[in-house]
């Protein structure tokens, strides 16, 4: 193994970047801002996908696939959406390369192969999808449409970081169409709730559900619901969003339906998405100075078995016990790997599995064979115990549950102890300086105040919590009346 | 339901196009050559993905994800590969739109936002992946690398058809790296074999495994293995390919490893892929003039239950029985849908499920309730039987197996009866004219003869079968010596 990680206290950002690479999750590629998701990182993403996909299907959604490209004329149809994404679009202008006359063996863009209309590589798919829905929707009988898509999208970000902000990322985007405003609003809330449940129960990441202020809304939405998580360094991370799009896209793409009375109405819409950014949230919620810490539900291997041996005979004896354990644990649906590589010593294997966050590590050596025991090491607490082989399956099963719960509880305690109510702007700035997470403060509801606070402190309104503490107050900045506290933070 | 399909005899191509759209599998989009895969079509593709993914993992492969874009300088590194794909590349040249001064509210490409180096939207990922592998491979301990990617790719085809040839398509591409030529060759054969097993056992499509001639090889490969299927109209369809890439990409990207003796060697490579084109193969192998016919393993719903009723009481009584059936069938792992829509009459439901290829349809009406029976209709044979409720679960289970086997057997009989051995060029042309499928003929092994035959007949050498009938002979065109028969056909 390469040398130790930078500690979080020393440089949180550097710790993150090193961890992503050293734990074999992802790396930068030859394409500016685009990442390579390595097998270990991708295996975690696949677990997220599988669980989300199940939740989407259980709530009545189906998957489909729409084109990667959006013709410019469609892209610009919904003006706010277009304006919001115009500054970060990858644009296809040509469709052929040809031999470069000046550089033998090399290629150049064929100037004759210019597209009549430029194609935008989708930064999000509302435009292409609503242009399609126009043909799918005639009557109320065609509604609702409840579709999700797993896809790659491209946003030409200038400053990128692995998983958190990349030019290309993987995500899912739900796009639904409804008869009524109420039904669409219910859908948008439902899916935000699905995200919250997923984040908390599956990723062990506590989140706050809320709505975005107007200035932080998705371009083209009338309301954006979100789940906000708090990272270990006190910065917030938007982990998922669900948008009530009103009739904006229906009007831009002329999507009407005949209601039960035969009257033509515009359709109501939602869209919602989470992305590989969740990998960043996962890392920055649970991991420590030794490396990744994975909740068992997301670990590609929940348990790893490392054999300790000096001779072929010892290896054979240890392997036999290990294989019995494999069978027993797998029968319980536990994913377990027998790390019998002969190219690495046990110490190197321990270090790797620690760095990669395997929740439980079993070591078996010759002494264990005599005693009918194994050594069990827990990644989250870095504690070791000796366990009788006969108890092992139950012990492992219970510990995996316990680790999942402990991680959530720990993150929840951290989050809850990092929400500070402030009543003056000096307090506000003071808390921010100490990197203490969310600030709960009164705000006068205006764009101007929000902008001004952002300008002065870099903190933004992360959300107006759905469970907002009601109660009159005065804005922490302007002193004007406020209807309740909102959550501010610096954010990823 | 809209009016009947064009029959296959009348116009096979028209039948195909209509079926894809009417069965709700896919449709054309606003982007030239790009398709929308609709939920029903996508659900079938998901079943293919799940099975293939399992087979890849069982053979030791892991998934990962590489960038959508390939910088031009990397794209052109492997010259044959670059030359092969240069004529059909979508090229990103700019990264920003701006307000169009001439058209208020509209956007144009920002001329200031020109990329320093153009980016090719991947038509295949060897270049970007081998550029990455260079950093992953130092020693023999780093090998083999066995990676697969599920992704979208773009090839700017001029003539497109839904699923069969689209500008953007979905696929998986495996990219492996090995110490020795023999190991890479074994991998390429193994994966071709995985494809053959998948096609036959899961899709019920009989395939012939073979190798491509030099002119039909993947650009950059030293050997291309393939599986070739025969469609109902007598045209062949390449359903999957697995390439032995030699050291071509290792040399182009300078990927070397230190072998056990510490000597530097170039790495050996394979790549292999199947795509949404398989949807086309599926349709053109099994479907009929009434619509789609799906093997049970690929059917989103293996069974559909249609209630027949005139009153609310009848509906309630029928529903109760239907729900019991749902529970029983689902307990056996059978996917079953209760089509209780009140917006459609039973006749319309029957027509839809027939068109969409649901393998088994159960109808339950008031008379059935009295008799303790249901009506069971089989999609592949279009036959109906009355079955006692008590026997139903076993009957359905057995029938699904039988349908799967019957479809394969039927397709195999068709295929085998459409391989014609010919010994003269007149015979060759005669068979082609009758659209009778594969032609097994002697060939002299030269590019010239292959080209000439293609020019004269539009038939190409689909493959040199792995189980080639050995035996000297004379080339059907040139009269020169031949070592065995190869398979010709017109192809999709």
Image (tube, coloured by chain):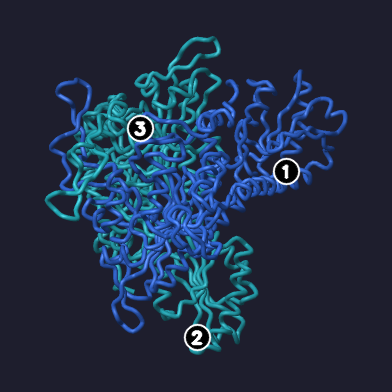
Chain colours: A cyan, B blue
Viewer-nearest of discs 1 and 2: 1
Q: Mark 1 falls on what kind of element?
A: helix
The Cα–Cα distance between marks 3 and 1, rounded to whole angstroms, is 43 Å
Query: Can you give x and y, in whole percent of width and height, for residue A21 in the image?
Result: 31, 62
Pinpoint the chain carrying mark 3.
B
**Same chain? Circles 2 and 3:** no
Q: Which residue is mark 1?
A: B329
The span from disc 1 to disc 2 (Cα, nearest Å) is 50 Å
Query: Cβ–Cβ below 8 Å for labels 1 and 2?
Result: no
Circles 2 and 3 in contact, beta carbons < 8 Å: no
Sequence order check, earlier mark of 3 and 1: 3
Compared across the picture, whether B167 is left or right of B288 comes to: left
**Residue B435: x and y, percent?**
54, 40
- Work out whether residue A445 or residue A180 is closer to the camera in this orientation and state it: A180
**Kind of element beneath mark 3:** loop
Q: Answer with left or right where residue A157 lies relative to residue B329.
A: left
Packing grade of label 2 (10 A; few <14, some 14-19, many >=20) is some
Q: Determine whether, in the image, residue A197 is placed left or right of residue A454.
A: right
Q: Residue at x 50, y 85 (%)?
A: A309
Rendering coords of residue A27 (x, y %): 30, 59
Secondary structure beneath dot 2 equals: loop
For label 3, the residue is B32
Name the residue rendered at 52%, 56% in the picture. B195
Residue B241 occupies which quadrant of the picture? Answer: bottom left
The answer to which quarter of the image holds residue A39 is: bottom left
* Residue in view at x 31 percent, y 49 percent: B85
- For the residues marked 2 and 3, what is the alpha-carbon distance in whole angstroms? 62 Å
């Amino acid at each position: 193994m390469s040398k130790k990680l930078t500690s979080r206290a020393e440089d949180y950002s550097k710790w993150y970047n090193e961890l992503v690479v050293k734990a074999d999750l992802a790396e930068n590629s030859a394409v500016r801002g685009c990442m390579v998701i390595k097998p270990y990182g991708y295996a975690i993403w696949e677990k997220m996908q599988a669980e989300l996909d199940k939740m989407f299907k259980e709530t009545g959604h189906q998957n489909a696939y729409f084109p990667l490209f959006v013709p410019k004329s469609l892209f610009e149809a919904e003006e706010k959406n277009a304006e919001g994404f115009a500054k970060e679009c990858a644009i296809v202008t040509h469709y052929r390369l040809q031999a470069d006359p000046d550089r033998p063996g090399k290629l150049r863009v064929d100037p004759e192969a210019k597209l009549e209309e430029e194609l935008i590589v989708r930064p999000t798919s509302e435009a292409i999808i609503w242009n399609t829905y126009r043909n799918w929707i005639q009557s109320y009988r065609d509604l609702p449409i409840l579709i999700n898509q797993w896809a790659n999208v491209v946003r030409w970000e200038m400053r990128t970081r692995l998983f958190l902000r990349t030019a290309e990322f993987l995500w899912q985007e739900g796009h639904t169409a409804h008869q009524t405003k109420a039904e669409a609003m219910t859908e948008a809330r439902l899916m935000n709730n699905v995200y919250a449940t997923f984040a908390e129960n599956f990723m062990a990441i506590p989140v706050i559900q809320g709505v975005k202020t107007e200035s932080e809304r998705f371009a083209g939405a009338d309301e954006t619901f979100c789940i906000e998580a708090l990272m270990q360094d006190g910065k917030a991370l938007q982990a998922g969003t669900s948008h009530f799009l009103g009739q904006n896209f229906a009007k831009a793409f002329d999507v009407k339906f005949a209601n039960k009375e035969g009257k033509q109405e515009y359709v109501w819409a939602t869209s919602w998405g989470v992305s590989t950014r969740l990998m960043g949230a996962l890392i920055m919620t649970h991991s420590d100075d030794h490396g990744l810490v994975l909740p068992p539900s997301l670990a590609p291997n929940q348990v790893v078995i490392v054999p300790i041996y000096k001779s072929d005979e010892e290896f054979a004896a240890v392997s036999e016990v290990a294989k019995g354990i494999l069978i027993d644990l797998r029968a319980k649906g536990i994913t377990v790997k027998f790390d019998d590589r002969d190219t690495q010593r046990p110490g190197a294997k321990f270090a790797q599995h620690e760095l990669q966050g395997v929740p439980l590590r079993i070591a078996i050596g010759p002494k264990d064979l005599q005693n009918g025991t194994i050594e069990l090491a827990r990644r989250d607490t870095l504690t070791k115990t000796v366990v009788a082989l006969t108890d092992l399956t139950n012990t492992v099963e219970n510990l995996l549950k316990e680790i999942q719960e402990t991680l959530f509880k720990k993150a929840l305690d951290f989050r809850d102890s990092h929400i500070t109510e402030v009543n003056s702007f000096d307090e506000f700035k003071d808390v921010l300086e100490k990197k203490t997470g969310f600030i709960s403060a009164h705000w006068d509801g205006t764009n101007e105040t929000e902008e001004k606070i952002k300008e002065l402190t870099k903190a933004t309104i992360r959300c107006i919590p759905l469970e907002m503490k009601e109660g009159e107050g005065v804005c922490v900045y302007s002193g004007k009346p406020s209807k309740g506290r909102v959550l501010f933070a610096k954010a990823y």
